[in-house]
Amino acid sequence: MCEVAKCLEMVRSHFGPEGLVERSKVSLVLKELSPTHFTDEVLSDLFVAGGTGQDDKVNIHSFLDWIFNGPGSKPAASPTEVFFCRRGETDWNLVHKLQGLTDIPLNDSGREQAECIASALKPRGLSAVWASPLLRARETAAAIVVTAGVELKTDERLRERNLGVMEGRTGEEVAEAYPAVWTAWQALEELPDESLAEPSEEVVSRVEAAMYDLAAAFPGQSVAIVAHGAVLRCLCRRTFGNASISTFSVGPGRSWKPVHLDDGSHLKADR
């Protein structure tokens, strides 16, 4: 094999600034570098010993440092501080219509709330901001990235829950047409099949996957997610106010825990 530093530089050149890389891609590059050293069996052992286990993606920089510079160089795994923000207010909030995947923009109050979130998070030194692709979330996140000085990334996994028959209706209208659905919604229970809504476990699965990818890309750092109320309901089994900030500790590995939920102290008293 070539000199350690040269090998490390050579492998890194394949990935550039990428943080998370597919295991299969990492394996292919290492095998090309030295097929006799990096056999399938050796690579499997390295992934396990390097702390990636059976994860589909690898934090490439930490993993390569550990391989080429030895176990002592592997940084201590640190949780990522995730500020999970519910987007600001829309006109549908004012008339108590459930939005779901309906793409409603922020109203004037919602844009002001977005600025309040941005001001509150500015001292946190955010390394990244990820958001739902829906307009109300993107508009909220746009205010945050301006003060944070980072680029906005949208992720489809952070989209709002499909609320099925409830979308576009007020609570009263849902209660009249689908009483069982509304009763379950109010009780924070799984919605019946007649709701035609996305199952809560599917919502949790995709949102957690996004959180774990974000944490793996920015270990030990502070980041923000901007998403939606029904998503947060599925994760935490409680309700959340518009433009609230909830703090999660994510990682190391595929784990997370709430630190502080539904903080509205950055908002005006009319929240």
Image (cartoon, grey):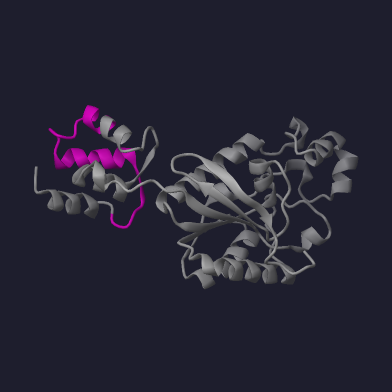
Relative to 204, is 169 on the left or the right? right
Q: Give the answer, above or below, for where 115 lies relative to 29.
A: below
Seen at 19% across and 31% down, the residue is: 39
Q: Residue furthest left?
A: 2
Image position of 52 (left or right of 214): left
**Residue at 67 percent of width and 66 percent of height:** 266
Q: Position of residue 114 (x, y in %)?
A: 64, 67
Q: Position of residue 69 (x, y in %)?
A: 20, 47
Residue at 73%, 72% in the rendered image: 108
The image quadrant where one finds the C terminus is: bottom right
* x and y, in percent, of residue 49 in the image: 30, 34
Q: Report the side of 152 relative to 240 (left or right).
A: left
Number of marks drawn = 0
Q: Is residue 68 left or right of residue 92?
A: left
Q: Quadrant of the N terminus?
A: top left
Q: Is residue 37 magenta?
A: yes
Residue 3: within the magenta? Answer: no
Range of residues picked out in magenta? 16-44
Q: Is residue 192 above or below residue 141?
A: above
Query: Which of 127 and 141 lies nearest the eye of the viewer?
Result: 127
Q: Nearer the viewer, residue 87 or 83?
A: 83
Quadrant of the rendered structure where residue 22 is?
A: top left
